[in-house]
Amino acid sequence: MTQLAGPNASPRAHKARPPRILIAALAVLLAVGAFLLWGPIGLGNGPLGVASMDGRFGLSTSQPTGFVATLVNTGGSAAVIDDVTVTSAAGYAPVRVLTVRVARNSNYGCVDTLMSSVARCARPPFEAAARFTVVPRANTAPGDRGGPALVIEIASPPTASCAVLTAVVLHYHVGIRHYAATVPQGFVWSCGRGAHLPQN
């Protein structure tokens, strides 16, 4: 008389499991590979960014201030801006962005902190940043870096407080791939009247 094996002792069951696990693992790997290859989320910062600044600078004011950041597209395809945000330094008032616009012509690496003199760095008229298309290789060739730049208008800081911008975050897409590029900008401050200035 042949003894039947229990469900946990079946040789056939043990042999059937590894191929199923292998097939499932292979399917997951293929799906992840396809997702990374074709989007919609791109890896890393991607080809679009702004010139990275270093150091500390700013001013005491009761007026809105401006920050100019040169747009740089290192890729061979156009990049379309979806949104622009900034990060604030811990321990200070949050930076309040009033508007983010784009100047089609600018001086590479030139920044300014007074809206009244921003035209020294970025030539008006300014356009809305959302849906602005940055052409391939913009501001990448030495001697040909007078292309587009962000003009970020920041609200005046609260009285007796300072607001400090530390990075610009670009949300954009190239084709169907979407990116979020965070670019450090040093320590860009504006302080209201009666505030203790940030220490160097």
Image (spheres, grey):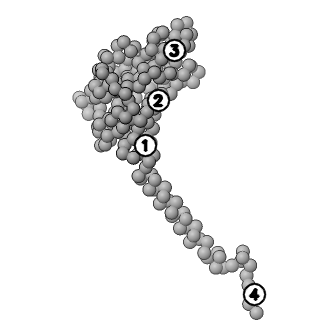
Earlier along the polypeptide chain: callout 1 or callout 4? 4
Disc 2 secondary structure class: strand
Disc 3 secondary structure class: loop
- What amino acid is at disc 2? Thr
Depth check, mark 3 against mark 4: the one in front is 3
| Residue at image coords 33%, 35% | 133
Mark 4 surroundings: few (<14), some (14-19) or many (≥20) residues within 10 A: few
117 vs 19, nearest the viewer: 117
Mark 1 surroundings: few (<14), some (14-19) or many (≥20) residues within 10 A: many
Per the image, the residue denoted by label 3 is: 157
Picture coordinates of residue 180, whole percent (x, y): 45, 38
Per the image, the residue denoted by label 2 is: 85
| Residue at image coords 26%, 33% | 141
Depth check, mark 1 against mark 4: the one in front is 1
Residue 162 position (above or below residue 138)? above
- What amino acid is at disc 3? Pro
152 vs 51, nearest the viewer: 152
Per the image, the residue denoted by label 1 is: 178
Query: Would you say 164 lies left or right of 100 here?
Result: right
Per the image, the residue denoted by label 4 is: 3
